[in-house]
Image: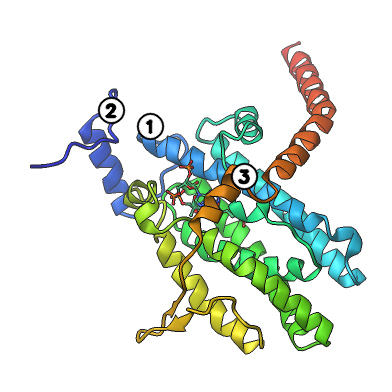
Amino acid sequence: MTQPNSHIAPNETAAQHAAFEARIERGEKIEAGDWMPAEYRRQLIRMISQHAHSEVVGMLPEGEWIASAPTLKRKTILMAKVQDEAGHGQYLYHAAETLGATREGMIDALLTRRAKYSSIFNYPTTSWADVGMIGWLVDGAAIKNQTMLAGASYGPYSRAMVRICSEETFHHKQGKEMIVAYAVGTPAQREMAQDALNRWWWPALMMLGPHDADSPNTGIMSKWGVKLKTNDEVRQEFINEHAPELLEAGLTIPDPDLHQDEQGNWKHGPIDWTEFWAVIKGERGLGAERLATRQAAHDDGAWVREALQAYTDRQRAVAAD
Ligand code: ACO
């Protein structure tokens, strides 16, 4: 017996869904004005807006270190990187707006905790090496995920990903360059790099999402060509690339169970998912501080939004005359 398609909304037909899925099957991009299932639209708004929030909140852990960067070169690189993240947030909010989401609604959902942002940004940056480790591991994980999303079926998201990935690649390289330099540097630098790896390794694995068996959204997102790989597949790719590079740099990965299997895949030990969910809910880590900082920035920016609105209203009035 065929299972009823639970994603068909009352005002949608099976034929509409079949035609939509055939387009995805042919590799066509779905564009903003095209017909799409309500659930496809809802899922994309959920994911893209949470991605946008992650880029913007993601400016905070590293932004704290701009004033303390050890050299002018490192400072200018970090400033450019943090500015890039702001730009990524803008591309992504725009991509979500093409689906009918409003900027006000998305920001409100973030500030009232109805929308999530990446768990990784609720961890503190306690040393300068964290800036390098975020570039190498966090941006490395983000690239693995987002290179996959560059092939997503929704055109505006896929194109935003292409642009974002090229900038993230620079972020990744500068992080790796910094940590490799410290790993072969003075004993104090080596210790700082190792300490950063000890704190960021597990959160970087977790940021790629729960195991596939515990991922409620992967099924439909894969069927509709948004996620072309599962959370565990992307995590495996990430470990396969980064584990040998970290070891080659002379660092110790804080996982006694890490080993390579016969296929050459690096297998990790058990992940502490209790920590993951507690960090997302703000019960552990800096969730409350991050949101308070975003709220303050939003309040401080009220006059800019009001001025832009007044300017737009005046331009419209002039045009109407
Ligand atoms: N942090 C916070 N929430 C997470 C995380 C995470 N690291 N991973 C999963 N979740 C949430 C999901 O958003 C989902 O919650 P929701 O249904 O309330 O939205 C829930 O946990 C269950 O997870 P999944 O069913 O696996 O969710 P999904 O299929 O959306 O996969 C993933 C999660 C891989 C993060 C996906 O949303 C994605 O690829 N997003 C776009 C990329 C992105 O946001 N990256 C963040 C980092 S950006 C950066 O580093 C600058």
- Quarter that holds the C terminus: top right
Q: Earlier in the sequence, mark 2 or mark 1?
A: 2
Give the residue type at disc 3: Glu
Q: Is ligand 1 within 8 Å of the beta carbon of the residue shown at mark 1?
A: no
Q: Quadrant of residue 140?
A: bottom right
Q: CA distance from mark 3 to mark 1?
A: 33 Å
As drawn, the label of residue 38 is 1
Q: Is ligand 1 within 8 Å of the beta carbon of the residue shown at mark 3?
A: no
Task: Find out whether the residues at labels 2 and 1 contact each other: C-beta distance under 8 Å.
Answer: yes
| Relative vertical location of residue 10 with respect to residue 110 in this rendering, above or below | above
Q: CA distance from mark 2 to mark 3?
A: 40 Å
| Relative vertical location of residue 217 with respect to residue 39 in this rendering, above or below | below
Q: Earlier in the sequence, mark 3 or mark 1?
A: 1
Query: Is 267 placed left or right of 58 in the picture?
Result: left
As drawn, the label of residue 12 is 2
Give the residue type at disc 2: Glu
Query: Extreme top residue here?
Result: 321
Residue under numbered circle 3: 283
Give the x, y percent position of residue 84. Answer: 73, 56
- Foreground: disc 3 or disc 1: 3
Query: Is 114 placed left or right of 298 in the picture?
Result: left
